[in-house]
Amino acid sequence: MVTVLVVAFSFLLHYKLHFPSSLSVWLYGGCEMAHVRTYNPRVRVGNWKEDVTLEEETLKDFILQKDRGELTVQKEGAIRQNILKPVSLSVSPDGFLHFGDTVMLVNSGGGEHEQRGSSVLSIIADSSNIASQSDTNSVPRLLGPLHVGGAHSMTPCVRNAFIITSVDGTSDGEVLRYDQSFALRTTAGFAGELFLASDHRTFLKCAKKSRLQELSLLEEFDFLCWWKVIYFDPQERIENEGYPVQVNCKVLISHCKTNQCLAALGNHILWTPFGKEYELTAHTFLDSHKAERDNNHWLFIMAHSANQNQSLMQQDSDIKDEKQRENQEDTQVNECT
């Protein structure tokens, strides 16, 4: 009897040294193989049927997502392809801004407190903001809410083109006037016709970097989407109420509910899928004379009637040259006095 036990123990010891994995299966049962795979999936050991079925289902889900265009790489490619499509800006025959015009909102930059370059109001979107074809049964489009930023590219495209929309029933083609309410809407199609909106800042809802009043693009149109154009010079602001708004001229864009002006912040940088951009908020910055600083100065850029592809950087250089001429004139006046 003792001899038999010694022989059996020797056999178990030899089997454990040469086949440890098989011994684990023999000791712990096949249930453990569902969690720890010791062999190749082709080897039918343990819960092999469940493993094969799981791999087949994973492959089916991948193929289904690929057909629907729901893969992350497909969404990123769709965003790049659609949001950077060129857009033709509207042409103003009389030099004024009209309802229904497609424009770009440009901040010319500058500043005494910060070195800020030119920036354009632009959409910030990633793969999580795009609707799949299965949800819309049509071409992909962006879903709100979305954030906005100050991009440096001056090329008109779907990302930075906005349409002047009426909020009081004014028909398209009518002139937009100072202190008249309007809305800024993205273009139709991929941009989703979203409205630029803002609201009072709270502890949970505010700008990401500056913690000021947040800007966003919403699908629902309400009073939060109402804006108005204010004349640039505070000393002539009352006299210009009700007059048509000129294109390519400095103006202030004020939010009707919060009475805060659209602003570009050069000292707060956002990292977006399109690169580094300025943070945009709704906040009025005042200087020592209680006048709005250049953070709040915006231009409605439209296409030129002679050349619709005119460089916007040339317009910015003209603005800077005008500033330099004004400074030189002030210096000459001071020297004469």
Image: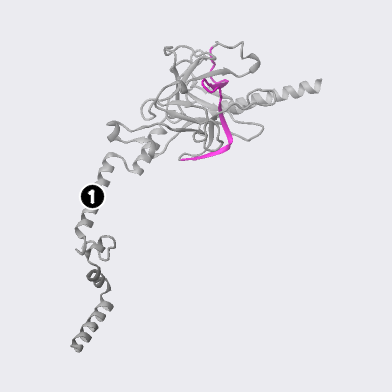
Residue 102 visible? no
Q: Residue at x 60, y 34 (%)?
A: 116
Q: Is 258 colored magenta in this rendering?
A: yes
Outermost residue on the front side: it is 1
Residue 286 visible? yes
For this view, does 288 lie left or right of residue 87? right
Q: Residues within 10 Å of mark 1 (few under 14, many from 20)?
A: few
Splitting the image into 4 quarters, where does residue 259 fall?
top right
* Quadrant, the C terminus: top right
* Quadrant, the N terminus: bottom left
Question: Which residue matches tag 1?
Answer: 57
Q: Nearer the viewer, residue 4 or 21?
A: 4
Question: Whole-percent x and y of residue 311?
Answer: 52, 28
Question: Whole-percent x and y of residue 326?
Answer: 69, 23
Q: Is 164 colored magenta in this rendering?
A: no
Disc 1 is placed on an element classified as helix
For residue 160, above or below residue 127 = above
Question: Whole-percent x and y of residue 27?
Answer: 24, 71
Q: Give the magenta range.
A: 244-272
